[in-house]
Image (tube, helix red, strand yellow):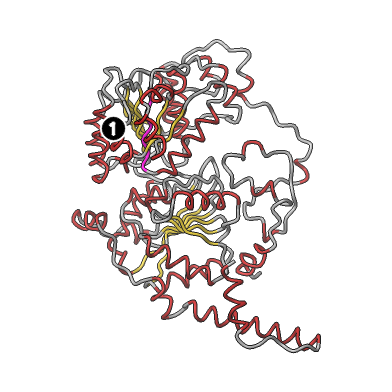
Amino acid sequence: MDAFGILTKSGTFFNKKKFANDIDLFDSQRRDGAEGQSTQLPKDLDFFGDLKTSADKGKRREKPKAEQATDEVAAYSPPSQEEANRMRKQMQVNVTDNAQPPLRSVQELQSALKFEKYLMRNLSFLDQLTPVQAQGIPLACSDRDVLAVAPTGSGKTLAYLLPLLHTLGEPKKEGFRAVIVSPTRELAQQIRNELARVGVGRRWRVSILSKANQATMKADPATRSKHDILISTPLRLKHAIETGEVDLSNVRHLILDEADRLLEMGFVDQVDTIVGACSHPSVRKSLFTATLPASVEEIAQNILRLPVRMIVGRKDAAAQGVQQKLMYVGREDGKLLAVRQLVQEGQMKPPVLIFVQSVERANELFNELVYDGVRVDVIHGERSAAQRDEVIKQFRRGDVWVLIATDVLARGIDVQAINLVLNYDFPQSPASYVHRVGRTGRAGRIGQAITFFTNDDAPYLKSVVNVMKSSGCEVPEWMLKLKKPSSNQRKALKKRPIEREAVHEAAGTKVGRDDVKKHKQLVNASKRRKVAGESGTRGEPSGAAGNGSASDASE
């Protein structure tokens, strides 16, 4: 099987209308409505491995438990302390306060916590609660500050959005009553989309802070009272506070999503300003994160008031649904060769997310893969917001099969069906590794993560090995015996990544795009000569092959 040919040639004739159901797997905003239809595909094109067969046709979808619970509410009987502890052990949940027992089912959102019917109707897609939701929602509904640590893709967003809407009750014209801070604009948009989905039935007024609405609020302060929930990145919100464009004195709920990133040194001053502006005496603060380094936990404890801490699984561990693998590539020139081998072996099944350490390297790798004919695009901070939005949409639709990203933008990419995460460049910290590989294996799916490492990365290998071990992955014994990087080494790597040979320079030594381009030109020229010979017509002028090849590769 020519897997490389499948990635290129088959993509050219991809029939979106015929395979609409499969494309929907990319689109998190539409995925819940697609059901009951199927299309048979050749085995080589079954990227997701979970297409419905003809045997599934005609099956009636069983009414979800949340939907069944809205009309008749069963009496709630709280679990005993012994049962609650047993549930936590089974879910691998640790809490510092046992006062709030975990929920046993979706129905208990209504029977135990008195969730409104509109919320329960909007949760018809939810068959069961994840551990962070089962324990986190009762905690967030209590009058306590919360510090929650759970793997990426484990359902943290719903774990704080549902209690938020429940405790706010209904829209009011009192100004912002809740603020959600996220490290990236893309993540902020995803939070808003999730709010729109679960908030149907109430006219919640949710605003993402932008230049446009900042100017409006400054020109007409009365518009501030027309919003209930504000979502923003820290720098923009800090600026709006300092210029008097927003007033957070009435905020009752402050939520920091991806708190490990927000409490890093670059954001601490901004977060401090935001926390200070939320001056209402009864404000409740919640921090949700996938990793919790000691330095971040220390800052978090200073922000929160007598918080209850919840940890799902092992701290600083990846989700158990991710199959993790380390791959030695020697030097930088071995990375592209390894990528092409993965393609030929059929391991690069779309959709694929590739991580690099800088914008420059993202662009360089993009140029190399484009010449390989791969449906690839790149997302990083130097692209405009509109460009980034369009790239994400194309990735979800399946128009883009391989997406190259940097760490900063990684936290805004939430595509449920990502099959493979490839760490082309070694991550700068265990937290970075956890967030990268957490882009796959989401919502109960099985995902794969492959991390390249070179001779230059060897001193830092043990930090990733520890995460893999904590996540339940099998790790060779010799890796477990590796020496840990020193404190100074870790700090240096986190501050500045390893200096690497440029991607295009490394490619030029062994497997550069010039060789690939020349090979394609020869193949295309051979095809034209064959066609010309059969038809008795003259071939195209020399030079057309080069132009045709470049044009085909860039489509």
Left or right of residue 399, residue 510 in this image? left
Residue 178 drawn in magenta: yes
The residue lying at 54 percent from left, 28 percent from top is 198
Left or right of residue 214, residue 52 in this image? right
Q: Where is residue 539 in the image (x, y as percent from the top left)?
A: 71, 87
**Which SS class for mark 1?**
helix
The residue lying at 52 percent from left, 53 percent from top is 391
Q: Give the range drawn in magenta.
A: 177-183
* Residue extending furthest toward the front: 219
Q: Position of residue 268 (x, y in %)?
A: 24, 40
Q: Position of residue 33 (x, y in %)?
A: 65, 36
Q: Vertical placement of 127 versus 328: above or below? A: above
Name which residue type carries label 1: Ile
Residue denoted by label 1: 241
Q: Vertical placement of 525 versus 226: above or below? A: below
Q: Can residue 139 be seen in the rendering of this structure?
A: no
Left or right of residue 174, residue 268 in this image? left
* Residue extending furthest toward the right: 535
The residue lying at 60 percent from left, 50 percent from top is 397
Instruction: State which quarter of the image contains the N terminus.
Output: bottom right
* Residue extending furthest toward the left: 488
Q: Position of residue 487 (x, y in %)?
A: 19, 53
Q: In front here: 70 or 212?
A: 212
